[in-house]
Image (cartoon, grey):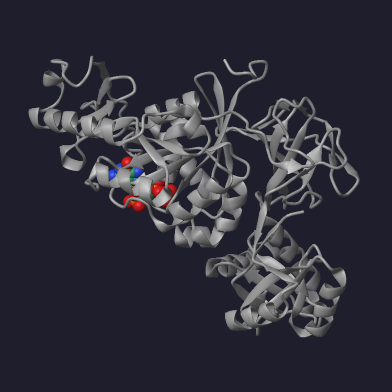
């Protein structure tokens, strides 16, 4: 029982990984264990369904990557799990980073043959900034992987984390004979009958000297397992829930998402060890989940989830209070109160209209553009602001050239929608009429042009701009800033919030100008509001 036993307990988490490590496969298996998918066949059906739903996004199909993220809710062991999916492609890290501000913990999936990869490390760093606790799942033990100690040491060294192995694979690849659950002294053997998806048979043993082991695994495997586990017990930290919850230690699970092996150990670990809703950083003070009034923030907006309806859904993380359908919440900073009549909860089987929701839950709020990423919604407060949602300075800047000038209204709408989703940044130079869009990766440009055509029927081209990079400007003295802007007009633009931006031709110019204007801060990230 937790301190919050009066309300349903939540596990709100995300999976972080490098593409191909097995995030999608693991997600499907977690949903399966959570009863959200009943048959192996449905996994496929769900995949097809999902692809059909996002038919409009040609890029997604062509590249075989997921560029949209969603929320999946399922039950396990009396708890409600909210899994926030994050796009894995590096060009979409901005969306991913924001999603990570809405979770209480994360599962880091690592491919046993590859170890820590570039994207794993980046996402881990974002988790570390917020001390998000991480459970590690080393996937694909059914295939030949790297030596176990090497993988564990790599996590410990590269991420500066204590590692605590909770299960140990009995061989890998062709020599794989099962998993040893160190925590519960159980040997898990794959069941032979059905090698498509199997749970495995568990045998409780008294330890690695238990004679029962002789009939369970080969002599060779027994010897190796004993030696390895003894070494691991001396070499690695013992599991400590406090150290895990403060982000200093990661418990490590091994398994195979594809073969359904070790997944139940993982989900049970999330249930037992991962934190429920944590206090969320905010001004004037953090919001505690026990606060009885409803407070939340928008971490993501998605336009055109259903192209036939041109709808727009804002995703709100509920941080405190009991949300009830039809409630009115203040949109901080605008003075507006918004009635939320048709909130959406994201059950994997069917999108349900929510009647109530609790801290840790994600609520989809259909709207026509009133809600924006970073918005705080509050039942009672007029001045509370959740903090820490980052904006990233673009690395590629392009001019948008409209083929048909009568479509400028549609272009404006498309720019607005896609900027809101975090696909692009939009800037308006103070001199000249053309829009500049900025992105952190090339793929975003392709998504932009493709969606412009498919969803808004606007033909446009992207032309090189004279600028390569951009920085937000900040200065304690408004006069100095105004003077800088006046004297650098041809390099100044405004973003959608009218915040001033300096655009530089290259890194050298940026350095040169920033060194000569040391009172002004040239910011690569900007915290929203
Ligand atoms: P991602 O979302 O992290 O990008 O990874 P995804 O789940 O799509 O998995 C990437 C590839 O790795 C897939 O193979 C998938 O079947 C495979 N995979 C995932 N988990 C395991 C595992 O535990 N063991 C083994 N051996 N393979 C695993 P693919 O050939 O690219 O795709 P598919 O044709 O199988 O769908």
Q: Could you tell whether 343 is left or right of 246 in the image?
A: right
Quarter of the C terminus within the rendering: bottom right
**Which residue: 59% across, 28% down?**
276
Q: Residue furthest left?
A: 219
Q: Residue furthest right?
A: 335
On the image, the x and y values in percent for residue 305 come to: 65, 49
Q: Could you tell whether 383 is left or right of 514 in the image?
A: right
Is residue 25 shown to the viewer in this render?
yes
Please, is residue 21 above or below residue 353 in the view? below
On the image, the x and y values in percent for residue 132 come to: 54, 40
Is residue 457 shown to the viewer in this render?
no
Q: Quadrant of residue 379?
A: top right
**Which residue: 60% across, 67% down?**
450
On the image, the x and y values in percent for residue 525 come to: 65, 62
**Which residue: 14% across, 28% down?**
222
Please, is residue 170 above or below residue 58 in the view? above
Q: Could you tell whether 280 is left or right of 226 in the image?
A: right
Q: Nearer the viewer, residue 74 or 502?
A: 502
**Which residue: 34% across, 42% down?**
139
Quarter of the N terminus within the rendering: top right
Q: Quadrant of residue 323?
A: top right
Q: Nearer the viewer, residue 403 or 178?
A: 178
On the image, the x and y values in percent for residue 422 come to: 65, 58
Q: Count the marks: how many?
A: 0
């Amino acid at each position: 029982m937790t301190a919050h036993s009066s309300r349903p307990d939540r596990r709100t988490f995300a999976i972080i990984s490098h593409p191909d490590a097995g995030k999608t496969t693991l997600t499907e298996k977690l949903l399966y264990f959570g009863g959200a998918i009943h048959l192996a066949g449905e996994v496929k059906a769900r995949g097809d369904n999902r692809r059909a739903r996002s038919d409009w996004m040609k890029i997604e199909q062509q590249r075989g990557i997921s560029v949209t993220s969603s929320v999946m809710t399922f039950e396990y062991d009396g708890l409600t799990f909210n899994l926030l999916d994050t796009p894995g492609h590096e060009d979409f890290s901005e969306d991913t980073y924001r999603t990570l501000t809405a979770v209480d913990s994360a599962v880091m999936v690592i491919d046993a043959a590859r170890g820590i990869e570039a994207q794993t490390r980046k996402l881990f760093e974002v988790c570390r900034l917020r001390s998000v606790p991480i459970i590690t799942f080393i996937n694909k033990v059914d295939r030949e992987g790297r030596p176990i100690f090497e993988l564990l040491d790599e996590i410990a060294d590269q991420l500066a984390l204590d590692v605590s192995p909770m299960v140990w694979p009995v061989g890998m690849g062709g020599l794989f004979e099962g998993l040893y659950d160190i925590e519960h002294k159980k040997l898990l053997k794959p069941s032979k009958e059905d090698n498509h998806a199997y749970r495995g048979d568990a045998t409780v043993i008294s330890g690695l000297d238990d004679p029962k082991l002789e009939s369970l695994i080969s002599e060779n495997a027994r010897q190796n397992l004993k030696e390895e586990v003894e070494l691991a017990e001396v070499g690695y930290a013992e599991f400590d829930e406090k150290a895990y919850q403060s982000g200093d230690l990661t418990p490590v699970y091994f398994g195979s998402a594809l073969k359904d092996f070790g997944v139940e150990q993982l989900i049970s670990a999330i249930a037992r060890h991962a934190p429920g809703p944590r206090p969320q950083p905010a001004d004037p003070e953090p919001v505690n989940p026990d606060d009885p009034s409803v407070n939340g923030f928008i971490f993501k907006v998605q336009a055109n989830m259903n192209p036939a309806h041109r709808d727009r859904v804002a995703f709100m993380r509920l941080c405190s209070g009991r949300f009830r359908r039809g409630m009115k919440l203040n949109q901080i900073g605008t003075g507006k109160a918004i009635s939320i009549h048709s909130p959406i909860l994201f059950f994997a089987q069917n999108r349900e209209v929510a009647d109530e929701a609790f801290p840790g839950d994600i609520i989809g709020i259909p709207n026509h553009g009133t809600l924006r990423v970073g918005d705080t919604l509050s039942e009672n407060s007029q001045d509370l602001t959740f903090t820490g949602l980052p904006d990233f300075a673009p690395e590629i800047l392009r001019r948008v050239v409209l083929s048909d000038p009568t479509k400028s209204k549609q272009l404006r709408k498309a720019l607005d929608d896609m900027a809101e989703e975090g696909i692009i940044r939009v800037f308006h130079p103070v001199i000249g009429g053309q829009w500049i869009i900025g992105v952190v990766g090339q793929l975003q440009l392709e998504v932009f042009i493709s969606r412009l055509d498919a969803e808004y029927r606007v033909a446009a081209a992207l032309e090189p701009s004279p600028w390569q990079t951009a920085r937000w400007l900040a200065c304690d003295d408004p006069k100095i800033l105004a003077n800088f802007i006046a004297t650098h007009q041809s390099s100044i633009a405004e973003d959608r919030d009218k915040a001033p931006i300096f655009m530089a031709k290259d890194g050298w110019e940026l350095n040169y100008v920033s060194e000569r204007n040391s009172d002004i801060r040239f910011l690569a990230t900007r915290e929203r509001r």
